[in-house]
Image: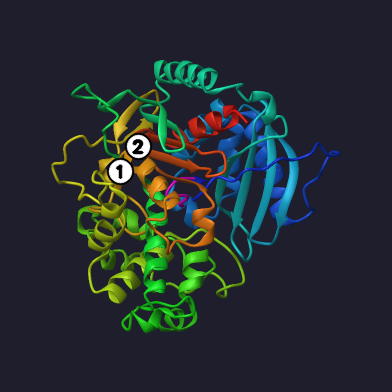
Amino acid sequence: MKKKLISFFLLAAGLFLFAYAQKAKVSLPETQSGKRVEAFIKAFNAGEPAMREFFANHTAKDSLKNIPIEARLNRYRQMHERLGSLELHKVVESRTDLLSIIVRTSNGQFVKLEFQFEAAEPFGLIGILVEDIEGEDAETNRKKDNNVLIAAVKEYAQKITAADEFSGVILVAQNGIPLFEEAYGYADRERKIPNRVETRFNIGSINKSFTKLAVCQLIKQGKVSLDDPINKFLLDYPNKETAAKVTVKHLLDMTSGIGDFFGERYQTTPKEKIRSLKDYLPLFADKPLEFEPGTRNRYSNGGYVVLGLIIEKASGVDYYTYVREHIFKPAGMLDSESYEKDASIPNRALGYMRDGSSWKPNCETLPGRGSSAGGGYSTARDLLKYTIALKEGTFAEADEEMHGGFSIAGGAPGLNAGLEWNPRSGYTIVVMSNFDPPSAERVVRQIRSWLPR
């Protein structure tokens, strides 16, 4: 369950690599959104009292109702501790409802911040998408060979584990062969059960890659077309206008205008009752589109739930069975599954959310079962097998983008996972954590910056 409004700072569905040349001092646009972002950076650097005031004065009322100021401040503390102060580096995109910028942090890191605002007055802040990116000095971090790389990874992993900043598994492979594979921390902190390399972790939105592949397979079989509207498959979809307008391509590209299922309805719904894809529909499907399909791009967990339902209708089996039989088994991913939350599963890590200076289980925040948008479980070795299967042609139906490699991630309170595969260099990085984001993603970013050329 990736980048979603359940937390103030959203996580990206994938990580993107950038190299930015040093430029002259840049300024934010003289717009309502530009002024709010300027106030955010100033408050972020000033400290907690200023951020409290910022959240109170600039956040959309509905968003503030769903996520109170104290929860936002807790996330701010984590982010400030990791990044330090922020300095504007580049304005990427500016619209009434969105402002995307690159900032440089006081520790030399580059981060992309995408601010999402209400589309009408008073243009309150809805959420922020946060992506770690490679900076212009990334080449100076490269290690000369794999021996030096692995030594650096081992030292780094021990350091962040000792600081109680990481719990999980780290795997680094080249050409499908693991160079480094170690587990850290506890799968169950109360019972002192350690994580192992075989431990199953909640991988959040990485499941979206399996959903996309399943759609590609059905397109190859002639059962689905990119131009098919939702109502070709889901005749009883709650919003008839949406069902007629939105196509499979819109859903895949996240240009549908369908929003998220996280929000007030999700918060008030008993999570144990959410156990099938159709159980997610009442959380979002009757709402109007956020924009005309195809005109914008916005991360959509709801859209990928709809894709899962289309997979079920087109294939004739439930989503979980389809993915198990047509993706997991062919790839040899025998430890991957969308387990029910209350099922007794061996080697499954419990998730832990930061609560002040301690950690608490995230069970109450999880649905009864994950969806085609995220929330399934896997192991580091299984995710490596997924990349090997793509490379070896097991999934010839996958589109060119998937065959060309990817950097994807998933995260929510108490869980974070990152998978990066570059078929040109041969390197695969898998990091799985049962701590809050960005516990796994920042490890992926660090290792990526060290990879030898």
- Left or right? Give the position of 252 relative to 54: left
Q: Where's residue 368, x and y in %?
A: 22, 53
Q: What is the image's colouring?
A: rainbow
Q: Amino acid at mark 2?
A: Ala
Residue 210 location, quadrant: bottom left
Which quarter of the rendered picture does the C terminus lie within? top right
Q: Would you name the residue on which mark 2 appears?
A: 380
Q: Quadrant of residue 111?
A: top right
Crowdedness near tag 1: few (<14), some (14–19) or many (≥20) residues, C-alpha within 10 Å:
many
The three-letter amino acid code for the residue at tag 1 is Ser
Secondary element type, mark 1: strand
Residues under labels 1 and 2: Cα distance?
A: 7 Å
Q: Magenta segment: does it hold 5?
A: yes
Say if 329 sits above or below 197 in the image. Answer: below
Where residue 342 sits in the image (x, y, percent)?
A: 16, 46
Q: Could you tell whether 258 is left or right of 344 in the image?
A: right
User: Residue 8, how many percent across, how many down?
Assistant: 49, 45
For the point 60% across and 47% down, which residue is it?
A: 57
The vertical placement of 310 against 189, above or below, is: below
Viewer-nearest residue: 349 or 114: 349
Number of numbered discs: 2
Location of residue 155 with respect to 298 vertically, above or below? above
Determine the residue positioned at 29% across, 60% down: 326
Measured as percent of width and height from the top left, residue 110 is found at 66, 35
The residues colored magenta run 1-8
Predominant secondary structure, magenta span: loop
Which residue is disc 1 drawn over?
378
- Residue lying farthest left? 344
Mark 2: few/some/many CA within 10 Å (<14, 14-19, 20+)? many
In magenta stretch: residue 375: no
Name the element at disc 2.
helix
Task: Determine the residue positioned at 47% across, 68% down.
Answer: 251
